[in-house]
Amino acid sequence: MNNNTPSPRTITIVDVALEANVSKSTVSLVLKGSPLIRGDTTERVRAAAAKLGYVYNRRAGELRGNSSNAIGVIINDLMNPFFAEVLVGIERKLVEAGYIVLMAHTNESVEMQTKVLMSMREQNAAGIMLCPALNTPRTLLKTVQSWGIPLTVFVRNLGPGDYDFAGSDNELGVFLATTHLLETGHSRVGFLGGQKGVVLDQRMAGYKAALAKKGVTFNPDLVVPANPNRQGGYATMNALLAKSLGATAAVCYNDIVAFGALSALGERHLRAGSDFALIGFDNVLDSEHSNPPLTTMDIRPSELGEQAASVLLNRIKNPGEKQQLYLAKPNLKLRQTA
Amino acid sequence: MNNNTPSPRTITIVDVALEANVSKSTVSLVLKGSPLIRGDTTERVRAAAAKLGYVYNRRAGELRGNSSNAIGVIINDLMNPFFAEVLVGIERKLVEAGYIVLMAHTNESVEMQTKVLMSMREQNAAGIMLCPALNTPRTLLKTVQSWGIPLTVFVRNLGPGDYDFAGSDNELGVFLATTHLLETGHSRVGFLGGQKGVVLDQRMAGYKAALAKKGVTFNPDLVVPANPNRQGGYATMNALLAKSLGATAAVCYNDIVAFGALSALGERHLRAGSDFALIGFDNVLDSEHSNPPLTTMDIRPSELGEQAASVLLNRIKNPGEKQQLYLAKPNLKLRQTA
DNA sequence: CTGAAAGCGCTTACAG
DNA sequence: CTGAAAGCGCTTACAG
């Protein structure tokens, strides 16, 4: 005695046609809002459909030739609020454009990624948005492209090549952050968190470039890698402090690493900002009310998501258009930690 | 010169049948792993499919009678890490069971919710998981049930009725939290954040029950409502302190409210734990490394998601089974703020 | 402006 | 164990 009051038989356009006294082609036409049909006929058909409780059968439509309205979105790490915010932006834009999202979470597993990709292909997705799992082979790009499904890669690129991409200028962002720290009197600036991947390479490049530009020599001991999460950030700050290198500031791989670092600092009764300068990356919502509020590089995560979705939407409309690139320019968001 | 190298013609089971020298029924049978087909035939068909690059057309299959493998999941507030964690749990379980998730984010909009629900119906979703937007009319339940689509409601219930639900024991959780504060020497315990909805009602009930049991009279001035986010938590703590009521502790509507409160405390150079006791609700990942680490009521968010998904999966398998209920028992997770 | 017909790619009885 | 046939609900030319 639950759910399921299955309708005796499913209502189709022929039922509606019968009720409205027209042919089923006519029903199909009014359903898609064709201007070929006279106003009163349209009315009659709509009324009949409503009366019978007709529900459009999208699979049948797609089978006959209509394109799908589902778009696949592949995320790796929804536990990171940055990706949650990006996803919200993507979803908003896509739904606004009349699509529905097929969401998958890979947890950095390349096999899982392959699996969901194939599943989305079977579903006949109208497009795919992919944030590639770490260690994704570049060949994946050609594979998906060969399927003929419009693709846009976001956040992590897959190396050089002819594909649409939306992300942020990581090198510039960390360059700016590091420079700010150097210019506000810190000479020993660490780099905390991150383990591998393009994004880390880009951010490290920005760190080194800023150092070089200010004439301070790069000290590998000041960079301490860790998984890009809170735990990693916590460990990383403790490790840096334990080295007694005289570091007074650090830029973090991303905001959640910074949050972990904040926690480690607090444990030692050190206050970020006055006792140790810290800059994050992303400007997730949480950073506005962390303790203390985090200075970070703002790349407007949900806007990034919307832009990435726009890129895909545009590709779907104009398959032949040239490569599209969106790179969010990071802005230093000064709060209390630096 | 991008994407799209559309295959000249799409490969169907008849192509595979031709290649393998069998009929298309046979191909269909091996595809679904029917034991009716001999081993060598199966091999031959599989090889032919692989050779031709055949892709199963799920819509066609569904049209002919197979059930859909897409399940709709409706979330309201992905910006709250609690929901992100729940979603991850749901997704994991569903994918594991061979489904794919149609995800929608309503942002607490009842209209948006209706829209995506109808969209999921058109998509022929095999089931729907709904965390209802605030102010969702109870009638929605009957509507969805009349569609004959298995439904499970999660986190926020829709009042009494015969429907599957997965959530947490909110009253018990806050009862436990409040009691702990009362028993550790605090007599003026506030309740921070939350604006409306069943969940708030339940949590407030727990707060009042704990007070009553300890014989302390309820003081409405000690409860300060606010949107259930970091901003709200921040405002809420400032407001409570401004009232100078002598409050020395508070239980928060949820973890992110507590994070905001932590930020407000930090700003006044007060340390949660020693200077003011605070307990959150949810035990989101972030709470382990907040500054300081948050004492909270653990309801294991991602497990809650998995359980909710299991409920739906079970309903799909056994449409006639009686109502299923899952209520996570909250456990006090002692860290440093209380 | 509207109707009759074919067909999208699959699965399901039904024969053999 | 395998083949021939019908049909799922729709859309798209094609006539009228």
Image: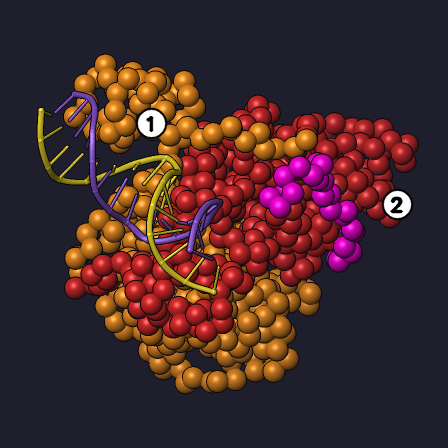
Chain colours: A orange, B red, C purple, D yellow
Numbered tag placed on residue A189 in the rendering? none
Left or right: residue A14 compared with residue B101: left
Left or right: residue B275 compared with residue A72: right
Left or right: residue A32 compared with residue B274: left
Relative vertical location of residue A55 with respect to residue A137 in this rendering, above or below: above
Q: Quadrant of the N terminus of chain B?
A: bottom left
Rendered location of residue A19, percent (x, y): 34, 18
Which stretch is magenta?
B315-338
**Counting other residues with Cα less than 10 Å from the Cα at mark 2, is it few (<14), some (14-19), or many (20 or more)?**
few
SS class of the residue under badge 2? helix
Chain hosting mark 2: B
Which residue, given by chain and number where applicable, does mark 2 sit on?
A: B183
Q: Residue at x 61, y 82 (%)?
A: A244
Q: Residue at x 43, y 67 (%)?
A: A114
Rendered location of residue B181, percent (x, y): 82, 45
Q: Amino acid at mark 2?
A: Glu
Q: Residue at x 62, y 67 (%)?
A: A231
Q: Nearer the viewer, residue A207 or A84?
A: A84
Numbered tag placed on residue A14 in the rendering? 1
Rendered location of residue A288, percent (x, y): 51, 50
Q: Amino acid at mark 1?
A: Val
Relative vertical location of residue A95 with respect to residue B142 in this rendering, above or below: below
Left or right: residue B142 compared with residue D10: right
Rendered location of residue A284, percent (x, y): 48, 54
